[in-house]
């Protein structure tokens, strides 16, 4: 049985402790009729995740993140078989002990796209970017209403207000230099974002790290995973991860993406959502991508999200 995890201190003590986590995972597997199956913990991810034998994956969510487990189980069940790219098929999900939640799902095949990217050709990149765009377009076209009881934020306009109020402090905590920090309030005030957009189901972390690919006989996407932070809101919000972690500030790749997606958003709008994103970390993005010589947020928007 896994212990209660409600605080950051408890998280740091329990979640990395493989002796505790493995014992709990084995006990839960026994309850699920999987006693004796080999368990292999994946090294990545914020939640403890285990391969169960060769075909299944068990993802665990402590009480502090229990709602994420409910969300992932519901979203994966809702989208099963509806996207151009495979997603994990849910075998079971629900509560465990002491506030923990679990999702037992099928294991996807392939290599993490982020690991394979540098080995692939420019033509491969363009083809895969188009495939990601088509997948995102289908996701955004699905009816999110059946998930409204488990996915936030509810009032999109109020969500934007909260994020604007926290934007400077969040980037300051991450160490963003003052020359950038002082631009944020005026830049955000200059960008009109819809307060009541047509609701779309959002992955919120569309990045190469969450796609799998097989490269034999030409690369093809074989999986999309990690729907725990899914939301319902404006579809442009999902372009933050696209611009930073998929097209990587390459205007030709962004142009290819928007053509395949079927719609383009203004660069200033996408940078505004980058600053407002729940997990926004502008210093990290500046290290990953080039910063324009002008040193303004407007020039940054064009550099990262432009198609010229």
Image (tube, rainbow, N blue to C red):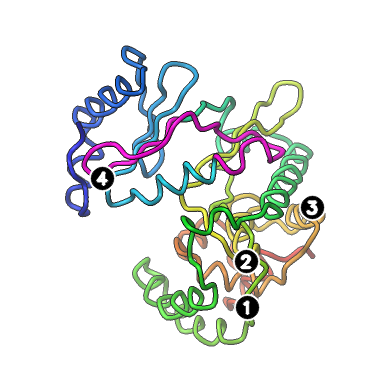
User: Where the C terminus falls, by quadrant?
Assistant: bottom right
Label 4: which secondary element: loop
Residue 45 position by quadrant: top left
Q: What whole-number distance in Å separates the C-alpha atoms at marks 2 and 1? A: 9 Å
Judging by the rendered image, the residue that carries numbered circle 4 is 99
> Which disc number belongs to residue 303?
none
Query: In terms of sequence position, does the residue under pointer 3 or pointer 2 come before the other?
Result: 2
Identity of the residue drawn at 58% across and 25% down: 109
Measuring from the top left, give residue 117's x and y in whole percent: 63, 37
Badge 4 crowding class, 10 Å Cα cut-off, few under 14, some 14 to 19, many 20 or more, is some
- Marking on residue 193: 1
Label 3 Cα crowd, 10 Å radius (few <14 / some 14-19 / many 20+): some
Lower sequence index among marks 3 and 1: 1
Which region is colored magenta? 77-104
Q: Is residue 11 above or below residue 196?
A: above
Q: Are marks 2 and 4 in contact (CB under 8 Å)?
A: no
Residue in the image at 46% along x and 59% along y: 284
Task: Return the disc, 3 or 4, that comes first in the chain's sequence.
Answer: 4
């Amino acid at each position: 049985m896994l212990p209660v995890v409600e605080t950051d201190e408890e998280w740091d003590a329990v979640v990395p402790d493989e002796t505790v986590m493995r014992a709990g995972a084995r006990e839960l597997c026994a309850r699920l009729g999987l006693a004796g199956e080999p368990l292999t913990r994946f090294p990545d991810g914020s939640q403890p995740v285990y391969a169960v034998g060769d075909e299944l994956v068990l993802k665990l969510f402590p009480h502090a993140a229990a709602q994420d487990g409910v969300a992932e189980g519901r979203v994966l069940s809702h989208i099963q078989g509806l996207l151009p790219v495979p997603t994990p098929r849910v075998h079971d999900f629900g509560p465990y002990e002491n506030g923990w939640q679990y999702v037992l799902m099928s294991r996807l095949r392939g290599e993490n796209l982020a690991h394979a990217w540098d080995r692939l050709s420019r033509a491969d990149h363009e083809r895969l970017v188009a495939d990601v765009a088509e997948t995102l377009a289908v996701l955004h076209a699905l009816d999110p209403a059946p998930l409204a009881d488990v996915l936030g934020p509810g009032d999109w306009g109020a969500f934007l207000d909260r994020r604007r109020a926290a934007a400077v402090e969040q980037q300051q905590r991450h160490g963003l230099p003052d020359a950038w920090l002082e631009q944020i309030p005026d830049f955000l005030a200059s960008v009109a974002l819809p307060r009541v957009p047509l609701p779309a189901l959002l992955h919120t972390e569309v990045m190469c790290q969450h796609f799998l690919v097989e490269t034999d006989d030409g690369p093809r996407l074989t999986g999309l995973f990690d729907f725990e932070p899914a939301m319902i809101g404006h579809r442009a919000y999902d372009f933050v991860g696209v611009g930073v972690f998929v097209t990587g500030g390459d205007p030709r790749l962004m142009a290819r993406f928007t053509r395949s997606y079927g719609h383009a958003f203004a660069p200033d709008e996408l940078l505004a959502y980058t600053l407002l994103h729940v997990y926004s970390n502008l210093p990290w993005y500046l290290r990953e991508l080039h910063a324009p010589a002008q040193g303004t947020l407007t020039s940054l928007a064009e550099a990262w999200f432009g198609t010229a």
